[in-house]
Image (spheres, rainbow, N blue to C red):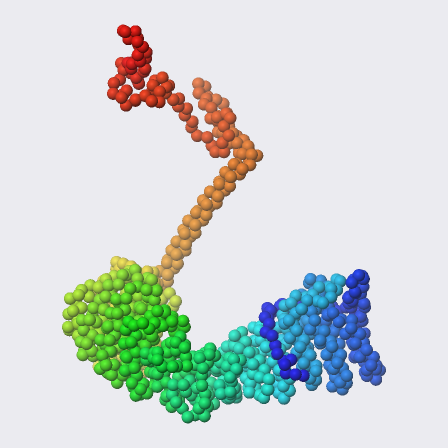
Amino acid sequence: MSTAEASAVPADAAEVGGRAKTGSPRTIPVFGVAIPDGEMQDIFKPMDLNRIIKLLEEDDKDVSEEKQLKYIKKLVHCYQNGFPLRDLAQIFKILSLCAEKIEKQPCFVEPASEIIKLCGLPFLKKKVSDEITYTEDTANSFALLGELMKIPSSKLRIQICKCIVDFYHAEPLKKHISGYQQVSSSFKIKMVEVGGLAKAMVQSALLLENQLVEKLWVLKVLQHLSTSGVNCTLMVKAQAASRLCAHLNDPDPSGQLLFRSSEVLWNLLEKSSKEEIIQQLSNLECLLTLKEVFKNLVMRGHSHYERQLRNDILVITTIIAQNPGAPMIECGFTRDLILFATFNEVKSQNPLVKSLKLFNCYEDFELKKLLFNIIVILCKDLTTVQLLIDGKVILALLTYVKKPERLKIIEWSAAQYEELQLHAIATLSSVAPLLIEEYMSCQGNARILAFLEWCGHEDSYFIHGNSFHGTGGRGNKFAQMRYTLRLLRAMVYLEDETVNKDLCERGVIHQLIEIFKTMMSRPAEKEEAIALEIQSDTLLILSGLCENYIQRKEMFGTEGVDIVLHVMKTDPKNLQRGLGYNVLLFSTLDSIWCCILGCYSSEDYFLEKEGIFLLLDILAKDLTAASLLIKLWRKEEKELGVKRDKNGKIVDTKRPLFTSFQEEQKIVPLPANCPSIAVMDVAENIRAKIYAVLDKLDFENLPGLSAEDFVTLCIIHRYLDFKIGEIWNEVSEEIKLEKLRLVTVDEKSLHSIIAATENIGKMVASLQSEMIENQALQDVQNEQRVYAKIQATHKQRDQAHKSWENFLARTSNAKTLKKAKRLQEKAIESSRYSKRPQNAIFHQTVIKGLNTTVTSGRVVTVESTPTRLLGGPLADTDIALKKLPIRGGALQKVKVKPLNGLKKTVPI
């Protein structure tokens, strides 16, 4: 068998089907035989499957081997177009009996293979419900295929693998069989999942270690099975990941073993428990195998396919490296990965990379990025630090922190180099804080500040912004500046005086202020969020440098105060935009504390520029002082580990203020002049200060508080009582430890004080519960009102919609119009008096001959003024009104006879 037959085509898996109750098998099944065109299609050929089963179950002495083979051959010929589902249980019974005879009678291999071959054809169903009825029979039959893989017959095993692969490449029936239909294409795939075939195939792979062809066929089957999440889960339970990985480097001239195994591992990682896969692969055997495979592909892989496979192996290794327990260092894999990651930037005489060269093809470019990425993961294990030093990782990464040299011929394209540069700077942010001495010996600060200065210059170089790290950097240098400031912030926040002093001596404070001014002067662009991040990081770096150093605060000076005031004048509406203004505001407040306070000249300038009023304005932004103090109290208690329920209510009424630290510390008898833990707690957090401020406000008429705030306020109000109770509890415990006995009066007083404190705790808890219940009731009422309003709105809309539909019906249908008119007349008649009152005047309400679709209103008939009174349309009414006739009304035109006998019309 050639190895080329082991190639597989991925196919989509179907969902898991349900398990249904099987039907009873028939005694004499009937199978339709295909008849040539023109002949009748309803002829059936009987086949007694029970007879064949009985024949195979009899001893060889009673029945000849030739007779058994003859009947099996007839069976294969009868079902040459596919097996009906209702006969499947009996057919696989026959197959099982044949398999039992193979060890002593090898001649049964051929008929068993023929039956299995027919299983690759589409199954047939008589009824639509057959797929549900025979679900269990089919699933059990497929489970038997996995068991048959244990038979030591190469032909039979390969035929089983071919049959399973055919399940994922269903073809339509070649001939139509009357009365039967082909089952759905996904039915077999579902039954494979239900039958647990995937687990059996993984177990069979252990039997084929020295049989390459059969092993490749099993891997081809697993490649198809692993497209289903259900099968992947079964394979993981059978330890498929570790078993496949351990044999990745087995001899295979075709290279298909490595390809198919890595494909199965990928599918397992994507479709099953990733954590379980990592645990299976985190052993020395698997990592040694992965190491050798990766080294071979890096040094000898030249084709496109081999480079892709190399990168896939590296991604799998990266996922394993996330497990701290993986023996990456012990197997030497970490050292080799660091070597491959830095050989291009740092010259090495190691034979692994002496003649190695990367090209600007896509696969080699991806390899370089993956190597940078795995360094970030490896450095999380502090035992890797020495290997990073030996591999000169800092020096290799710092080679990218420089202005791109256009005249220098490099192996990467401009876009590729840009992406690698950003990736290297991001990697430095994780690695450099671990290797401070290496960072300083390589002049890391000088390189960063020089590169940062170039980022702030306006020149013709702009990046493409076509990568994850280059987001928002197209047409500018924001991406380089953004990641460089992140690196600088990581180094400053180490609080290593050697690093910070060196930065300040190189003028970093003035440089950062200039960068901030440059960002302020830029117009609003699409990259506003990135610009805000740059400004926030700049202020955080300045805060880290200037804190506790008066001289550096003086260097911050008035220029620094100006940029702080600029941020404080930000429009409050921007704080709700979610672009990073909140972070910038907090960074600004931090810089006020670290860079201004403590330096008299800066403080005076800050006050002169009305900075204190800007601070008060910030406090007044939708937040009252009481609300702010209560929020600070809740935050403080969360950090201290005080027990509260989800609503902020007291949990322990005996010790309402107890912190996690107080619970861990045991009470020890102390001298009278030594403060106890309860007393020290007052000075070690801000709860006492918050209580003092709110006590001055009398805990009443505090505006802007929510229900949650009032629940917390109940505790704050009783802070002093609870604290006194804590102290008396400590006194009681110390007395017990010292084995002292109090007099009766003192003992009663002590118990009374402790009981009173507990009663106060219960009272506060009860009050809190009442507040919470009232708020819940109020929320329900508010919700009901909203729902009632929504319901009324929908009802009104429905009525308007129905009214419009009725109107359209009357206008488009004559019968509906007539019916509506009859109803209208009926309603009018019903509204009238049954007997007309005496002397009543009857007014007609319906206009005869009027065809309208709406109720008629009042109609007023107005007759126009006669033309003879107006004098016609051309009469000069304005002139006529100047002189009213004696008879009143408008002027009339009359004919008069003049003295000379001429007729003349004059107005009178």
Image coordinates for residue 329, horizontal then vertical, percent: 44, 89
Classify the position of the C terminus by image quarter: top left
Residue 590 lies, in percent from the top left, at 26, 72
Quarter of the image that includes the N terminus: bottom right
Q: Quadrant of residue 580?
A: bottom left
> x and y percent of residue 501 in the render?
24, 83
Left/right placement of residue 690 relative to residue 802 reads: left
Closer to the camera in the image, 695 or 738: 695
Q: How many marks?
A: 0
Q: Is residue 859 left or right of residue 714?
A: right
Against 170, residue 299 (above or below) is below
Q: Is residue 787 left or right of residue 869?
A: right
Residue at 30% x, 60% y is 573
Using the image, determine if residue 495 lies above or below residue 347: above
- Residue at the image position 82 percent from the left and 81 percent from the top: 66
Q: Is residue 511 left or right of residue 118?
A: left
The residue shown at (30%, 9%) is 902
Residue 337 lies in what quarter of the image? Answer: bottom left
Q: Is residue 287 visible?
A: no
Pinpoint residue 13: horizontal percent, then vertical percent: 59, 71
